[in-house]
Amino acid sequence: MKQTTVFVTYNPNNDFEQTLAVRLHTIGAVHGFEMLLPDRFNNNSSINSETLYRIQQSDYFILFSTSALTPIVQQEVLAAFNHLKNKSKILIIYDRVKNITHNQNCTEVYIDTSKQSSQQILEKVISEIKNNQISSKKEETTNVLGGILLIGLGLLALNALAKAK
């Protein structure tokens, strides 16, 4: 059976998002997922062939966004949709502020870690994923992403607590 592949991205020049993506990459890999990150070694302005290849190898696309989406991330979302053709497998979780106008190519979830509990946020994320699923396997995406999403949400909540002090 093929290992589930998850592409985790971040906005360039956003240290918190990059750290969160790298941590999710490590945790996901330890728990049996093939985790992929964007290749941003020499380019933060346009998607390169290596990043495009990694997106095309993935089963899911995740971004925890705390800032406005950069053009390169918008290109990655479009590439993921062109590959997956299923917006329930392309998930962007925005912390507090909606960063872009509605993007019909993904599932967008808007949360406020300072006002919502982890349980409320997780329920909202799962509800949004289910609302956008087009396959007959309604639980598949939720089950695969549940653990990774919970860890990412926990890291967002910890960041909010640290900023509040």
Image (spheres, rainbow, N blue to C red):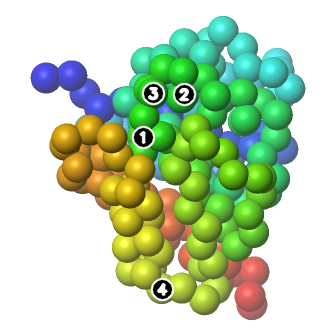
- Secondary structure type for disc 2: helix
Q: Is residue 136 rendered to the left or right of residue 47?
A: left
Position of the C terminus, as image quadrant, is bottom right
* Residue type marked 1: Lys
Circle 1 crowding by C-alpha within 10 Å: few under 14, some 14–19, many from 20: many
- Secondary structure type for disc 3: loop
Residue tagged 1: 89
- Secondary structure type for disc 1: helix
Circle 3 crowding by C-alpha within 10 Å: few under 14, some 14–19, many from 20: some
Foreground mark, 3 or 4?
3
* Spot occupied by residue 12 in the image (x, y as percentages of width and height): 79, 40
Q: Is residue 156 rendered to the left or right of residue 24?
A: right
Residue tagged 2: 80
Distance between mark 3 and mark 2 Cα atoms: 8 Å
* Residue type marked 3: Lys
- Write the residue at 39% across / 80% down: 119
Residue tagged 4: 117
Q: Is residue 107 rendered to the left or right of residue 138?
A: right
Can see residue 149? yes
Circle 4 crowding by C-alpha within 10 Å: few under 14, some 14–19, many from 20: some
Q: Earlier in the sequence, mark 2 or mark 1?
A: 2
- Secondary structure type for disc 4: loop
Distance between mark 2 and mark 1 Cα atoms: 9 Å
* Residue type marked 2: Ala
* Spot occupied by residue 57 in the image (x, y as percentages of width and height): 43, 18
Residue tagged 3: 85
